[in-house]
Structure formats: C-alpha cells, structure tokens
Amino acid sequence: MAVSSADRLAGIVGVGERDTLMFPTALNLPAGHPLNVADIEPRSGIWHRGDPALQTAWLDCRMRSAVLSTDGFRRLVTDGWINPPANRARFTLIYTPGETPGYSAWWVGQQEAQPADLEVSGRPDLGWAQLEPGWPVNVLRAMRVAVIGVGSIGAAAAEVLAGYGIGTLALVDPDRLLSHNLIRHPLTARDLGRTKVAGLADHLRRTWPETAVEPLALDAVVDADRIRPMLKECALVVCAADGVTPRRVVSHLARHARIPAVLACVLEDGEIGEVLRLQPWPSRGCLTCQREHLAGSGGFDPEPALDAPYGLGSDDRPMTAVAGDLHLVGTLAAKSAVATLLERAGHHDQILPGDHLLLALRPRTDLPPPADLRRTGDQRWLQVGPPVPGCPTCDPDTGPR
Amino acid sequence: MQVSTAFGQFQTIVNADPSSVAEARRRRNLFRDALQPLRDVVSVIPSGSLARATQLDPIHDVDLLVEFVPAEHPEWGSPGGSADDALTYLAGQVMRTLGATSGTVANEVRLTSKRNHVVKCFLDDPEAEDPFAVEVAVALRQSDGSLLLPERYNSRWITADPEYLISQVAGRQQTWSDFVPLVRVLKWWRTNSAGLDMKSLAMEVLALRCLPVQNTRAAALAQFFTAAATEVMYGVFDPAGHCGEIQPDLDRDATRSKLLEAAELANEALDAETAQDADKAVALWTQLFGAEFPQPSGQQSAAKPASAVAATLIAPRRRIRDIPQG
C-alpha cells in the first residue's frame, strides 16, 4: 500500500503473494494528491475472501461505532487466516463478489477488528447518473448554455451551472485574469495572465468532467456578429458582463435568438444584487424596457449611455463588492437559469416567483423602492413589464414574434 | 378511488362513442373508395383528427386529401384562378360519384360547398344542427414530399405537410399507449375550459411538444400543463415547418394563465397522490376537469362537487421531518 501517515490515508497499489507482486495497480489520482508521493509499504495488508456476514458486520460496526472481537472476525474469514502481528493492527481487505457492499476494510489486531473507512475509486457509475431519478439529469445534459462575462459573478455561475448538470457551457469573455481579480474570482494564481475563459474551462473540466466547455475569448459588443449565431444554438444565456453596453447587446441578441437571458450583477457598489430574467415573449420587455419601467417609477436612474464608474481594482478605483456576495449572485443567476430551463420542460417545482430579483447584500437605509430592502438577505421579486413602444429590440416589426 | 381508476373512467367520457367513430370511418372510406379509382388520382389520404385518432365526441367532420396526378392538371399549382378551379373540379367529382341523386358509386352527398382550402361535403341535412360533413382537399405532391394545397380566397397554392403530424403522433403513440388518449383528454379540457380560446390543432401540437412519456397519466398531465404554459408564449407553429403560426391571434398570456392554473392543481394532485391521499388527489383532478371527472370515494352521489372538493382539501398539511442532509 501507499501510505500517507500525515493524512492517515492508504491506497492499494498492488496485490501479490508473499513477496511477489502479481497485480500492480494505479490509483489514477490527480496531480498533487498525497498518495502519489507517499511511501510504498510492501506486505502492509492482507486480502481475504470472507463470509457475506462480514460485510454486514462492517456496516453495522461503522454505524454503531463498534468493533468485532478478533476471534469473531476470524470465524467469518473463509480461508487463509493469518494471525495479525503482535505490535500493530493489520490492514485487511474483504472481498465478497456479488454482495453489497462487495468490499470492506478492517484494522485487525490481536484482540479486536476495527472497521476502516473504504473508498473504491474509479467506479464508472459515480457521475451525474447518481442524481437520477430525483434530478432531471438527461434534460439538462442535452442543454447548451452560454455564459457571457466570466468575472467573479459569471465564473461562479458557470461553476454552479456545471454542478446542476448542464451538458455544454459556452464561456464568452475577452479578459485575462489579473492579480487584482484574485481577491474575488474563483480562479487562482495558477491561471494568472491567461484568458479567464481558458482558465475557467480547464477548472471546470477538472471539477465537472461531464460538462463540455467551449472557451470563446470574444467581446459581447465587438464580436456580436459571432455571438449572434452561437446563441441560436443555446437554450439560454447568462450574462454577467460588466457595464451597460454589453448587457444591452446580450439582451438584444437573446431576444432575437428567441432564448431567455438571465442577467446578473451587483448595483450601488455591491449593496444590491440583481438577477433579471428576460423572456423573449411578446408581452415581456427587454433590459432597456425594464430599466425604463423602473426609471418611470422613480426608483432607478435611467441607464447611462456611458458606464458609470465602479470599483475595478485599480489604484484609483478600489474594489467595492466582496467575493462571497458576488458568488452568491452568480449562484442565484445559475439557479434562475436552470429553473427557467426546467420550467419549460414541465418541472413545476422550478417555477420562479418572478422574473426580476433584488437581493440585499449590504443595504443602506436610504434606498428607494423597489430596492428598499432593510436587512441583508432580504429579497424582492418583481415582474418584467411589457415592451416599451418603439423599442428597437422588442418592436414586433423588427423583433421576434 | 385510486387516481388511475378515475382517469380510466374519465377516458370513457372523453372518448368519442365507438359507433360514431365507426360511422365516421365508414363515410371516410366511402369517399376513399369512390375517388381512389379515378384515373387522375394518385391516392386518397386520411387527414385530420380521425387520422390521428385524437377525435372527440361528437364527430362533426372527417378530413381527406385527394392527391392528383400533376400531369393531368398542369395548370394547377400556379397562383391565380387554378386554386378555385381545382376545388370546383373536386366538388364536381364528389357529386358525380357520391351525389344524393345521381352518384355513380353511392347516393350520400346532399350538398358540396367550397371553402378556402377544402370542399365541404354534407351527408346530413345541411340545415340540421351540427350536420356531419366530409372535408375534402385537393393536393399535389412536391419533390420534397410535401403537398401543395389550394388557398381559394388568396388565389394561390400553399405548401403543407399534414402527414408529418400524423406520423409524429403515431410514433409517440407507439412509444406510449396512453399518448393519444391523453391528447383527447387535453382537447376535452380545452373545449370545456371557460375563457380558453385555443384552436384544437394548436392544442394537439402543444401536446406533441410538451406531453412527456411518463409512468402515469397524472404525472404526464402535470408536466404537460407546466411545460405548455411556457411553450405557448413562444407561439405554436406548424410542426412540419411550412404553415407558420397555427393561431396568430391566440391570446398567449391568457392561455398561459389558464395552463398555469391547471398546472397548480395538477401538481397539487400529484403531491396528494404521492402522500397516498387518493381522495384528495381525485378531488383536485375533479376541480381541474370539472364535474364529469369521477368524484372521490364516498362522494359518488355528491350533488355539488365543488363543496365536496372543498371538504376534501381541509386535510392536514405535510410536516417537515427533521432529517437534515448536509
């Protein structure tokens, strides 16, 4: 066995008879795992064929924090019993083909046999399939979702989308990961200087290997002509891009691709989180229309033609939103996106209470309605209003029916 | 009463009377047998809900497509008066073979009337309430397998593929034998839901998109109502991709609202069934479909189903079990 004493962890790297190694095996653990560099201890354990009752006893002992007497344990070992050494407990693996569990592991001393935690690695049945039938794995596996803007919110959203089982993620962002990003971004210094989409794609492939990831170092505004056809192949787009212009572009492109868009951001330097779902329906407006409705009610300023300043992490513009809050908004955006897809597939338990969520992150006492949330964690769901007459995105003469 | 039993009983109410179906098929076959032998006819193709087996009671009409040999009518298929000419020709052939006084094959058609796409052939008294009619259309096969049909009011011919929906429905039925019966249930719900102004064909196409194969009819319907409430907002289009939106004037928001109401009841019923409260589940389905849906056990003779439903719904709510999962 390879034994890492510091981690109280051992892995079986070969099976033999006495001093002859007959079946060397690889643990296939990822780089950096402590067992990859652990000392190999020959003849450190023993493999028995046992009575199925031994497996039941293993489960029972673990549940009740109990042990077996070594005599009792010995009576259940079918053949090949060898007394344990006097000075230490010996690792013993029991295999009973066709039983559940098929394997159990014990530390066997001269007086008692203590059950050990055991993991059989490399099983092919441990992917998303484990979540079936409680979670609609096959519905989501068939979906392709675009995430435009993979900064702190978008990267968190992408990770959660993969965790929900989205089959394909198209990641769109031209930016590179810089030092000042690290305080908020899920990626680490390991990816410093790479494009965020490349780093995040590698990260997702390591963490969620069943999700296909397509990194696209494109700008939503400059490369709109390339994003437009790509969205037509997607079931939904999540947009967590910085600034007004790219969000408006995504709102426009999604409506014309006839797919829902979920836009996520923080407002007022991180006081309020916002998740806005835009449905490409004739009776629902786009981002600009919704902002105009809110401006009309007096609670929001109209969206500026030029982006307002906010914390970028530069010397003159310090960070204003904190990683946990940004990741929370990203998680809520991903949840809203998956709920939108599943509602359309008929999953009633995924119907959202509205299309527009405002979430208090660090609320001040003077925020106007509808953002007048007083306690952190307070939420308000709004509905999206109809298209504003003359809107170039929603106009039925130019927009979708 | 178990939910599956209630659905079984309800299905017999929804389904068209077998004798009506047999008579409709007899009349359809009469037309097929009369028109098929004509030298310029390629085939007579059953169409409409009877061909898809999604018909409801009462059956008012039967649809047929008469595919003609293009070479026999080279002027057909072009914009202009040929659309009207083709329907006039077909009406003449119907009366010649099946006319009540001088038909060469049978004497059953009292009157023909040209409509936009079809010739409506009355076999009952046209003045009677809801007279039975066979609607016959002219069709020309195109190289891609689709059909050209005359559109008389616009003096043009349009491309359509009604056989596509028939084959899709048949395929789904092969996968799940409850599919077509449930389409009838949905069409029945459409007909009997006040304020729902949705075309029958739109509901059938919506069912094709949103009615899943499920373990039970109840689960499939619950999933349908939720999915359809979203799908209808995108518009219901010809599944073959030729004829565009089936009902452009459909009030999508009002229809979504109705479908969501039904989804709430259906999913509440599903939860009640999961909680093994069959009476509550049946009562909720009764609330959804109305008094013709069977009543819960012990309320078979209930004169006022609404109050029976209210009484059943006062059951205690589920409690949260403190079994945390981290």
Image: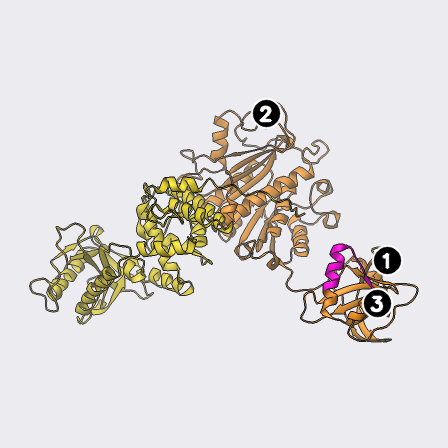
Chain colours: A orange, B yellow
The local secondary structure at tag 1 comes to loop
**Amino acid type for the residue under numbered disc 1:** Ser
Instruction: Please identify the dominant SS of the magenta region.
Output: helix
Q: Position of residue B166 (x, y in %)?
A: 33, 62
Q: Are marks 2 and 1 on the same chain?
A: yes
Please indicate whether residue A128 sits to the left or right of residue B228 in the image. Answer: right
Dot 3 or dot 2: first in sequence order is: 3
List the residue tagged with mark 3: A71
Pick the residue in front: A119 or A212.
A119
Q: Earlier in the sequence, mark 3 or mark 1?
A: 1
Place of residue A261 in the rendered image (x, y in percent of width and height, measured from the top left): 51, 44
Q: Are marks 3 and 2 on the same chain?
A: yes
Residue that badge 1 annotates: A5
Chain to which the residue tagged by mark 3 belongs: A
Q: Is residue A59 magenta?
A: yes
Q: Which residues are magenta?
A: A56-69
Do the residues marked 3 and 1 share a common chain? yes
x then y, percent, for residue A130: 61, 58
Q: Quadrant of residue B183?
A: bottom left
